[in-house]
Amino acid sequence: MQSDICTIKVRDCSYIDIEANMAVVINNCFTSTNVFRINTDSVGDETPLLSYSYTHKKWLTGRYIGKLYFEYNGRPHCFEVQPRFGNANILILLEEIFNIKLAHSTSEYKLYDNSDNELLKKIISIIWVKTLSKINIHGLPKHKVEKLNKSSTVRGKMAIKKSVLPIYKENYVVSKRIEKEVDSTILAILKKAYTILCKDYYLTENMLNDAVKEVIRVPCHNKQVITTTQFQKIKYGAIYANYKEIVDFSWHIIQYKKQSSMHEMADIMGNALFLDMAEIWEKYLFTILKKCFAPRGWHVYSQQYRIYQNTGFKRSIIPDIILEKDSHIVVLDAKYKRMTGHFRDYDRADFFQLHTYGSYMESHNKKLIGLGLIYPLSERFDKEELDKNFAKNLYGDSTSNTWFKVDGICLKDSHHQLTEQKDDFLRRIESLLLV
């Protein structure tokens, strides 16, 4: 029974007291496949749920939030990582990212903040809606089927052999034609996933856009349960190739539903569902910066650059956020890590990484204006603290005109307060864009 499960509740990016053997078991049970990605193009790495800090001599949770069921010392356990800034803040970030309204009042944000499972499930619903909306450009996938028609007129091509007796006895002909109709297997899978999301994942009517409503309204005549074999035999034409993404995701939702009984211990051990808060934080920053500065002539983008090609040590670098205007560049790196202002919160590797990005841009004839590390900030940060985290010149004492900044947004409890913090951050960035 679920009451027999020992639940361990922790916060992301926080130090915890836990047995070393249990930490090893948790990391061994967790894989990147347990993480739902809001960006379907992103590739998950193998970052563990827990890492050990030799400085603090404690285990540190990482960037993932969610639940992992596992067995330890013969007893079922649930390791639950909750967002350190609260569920309400994540909903607000997602509203900005997807341009969708999830709550209509402050009280609703508070309600969500007190719910155990609603956040992750609603996010999965959002991913499904947005993915289907993005893909449904040409309508639902269709395939060619042969239709037979029995009447006094020919529709399509006459089926001569099948018409001989009908013409003589009943005065009608049999004709055949090729028509395109919606793939019933794909439609049935989408409809089933939609039903599950509405029932178990808090999907509501106000979360649907016109593209998704168009799909849902299509009648489905296939009432049979879709088998794994039928799913695996689905074929996508070139124009509908992108549909594989949403069909696979929908199938995953259906299978997860079948396997997620919470009444039998054997069914839940090893189950896990997590979100990558670093991905959400990066996407949020990218969205608000693009909304603010793209109308002012700045190209806001992210791009992969391959370096040292044709060598044994070839690599790729991917700056999170680049702002470019008339060959003038600002590079920002989103970091979802602890940032209280303590010296140890500033990671040397992050500084080296960002300086590498800047050096690469300058080597390709870009005018580097500035570099910045952007964190979700704790309440300790104030204007005076932020002013200390700015250097007018790279390395602090060089002749370079490139600035370096550590900045961020304090994630407040309310939508109004978070909006104020966001606007203050954007104003600070704007004051440094002197092109």
Image (cartoon, rainbow, N blue to C red):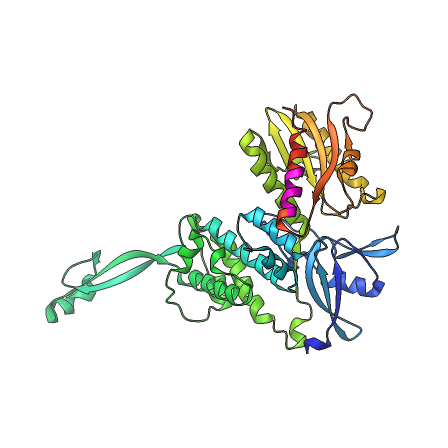
Q: What residue appears at the point 43 percent right and 52 percent down from the top-left corner?
A: 211
* Left-right relation of 233 to 90: left
Relative image position of residue 339 (x, y in whole percent): 77, 45
Residue 417 position, x and y percent, is 65, 47
The quarter holding residue 123 reads bottom right
The secondary structure that most of the magenta stretch takes on is helix
Q: Does the segment drawn in magenta span residue 423?
A: yes
Residue 272, by quadrant, is bottom right
Is 128 on the left-hand or right-hand side of 384? left
Residue 322 relative to residue 390: left or right: left
Q: Residue at x 67, y 75 (%)?
A: 266
Looking at this view, name the residue that lies furthest to the top. 399
Identify whether 106 is placed above or below 328: below
Q: Is residue 342 left or right of residue 362?
A: right
Q: Is residue 257 magenta?
A: no
Q: Which residues are magenta?
A: 417-424
Position of the C terminus by quadrant: top right
Q: As displayed, is residue 352 above or below residue 225?
A: above
**Quarter-of-image position of residue 380:** top right
Q: Is residue 399 visible?
A: yes
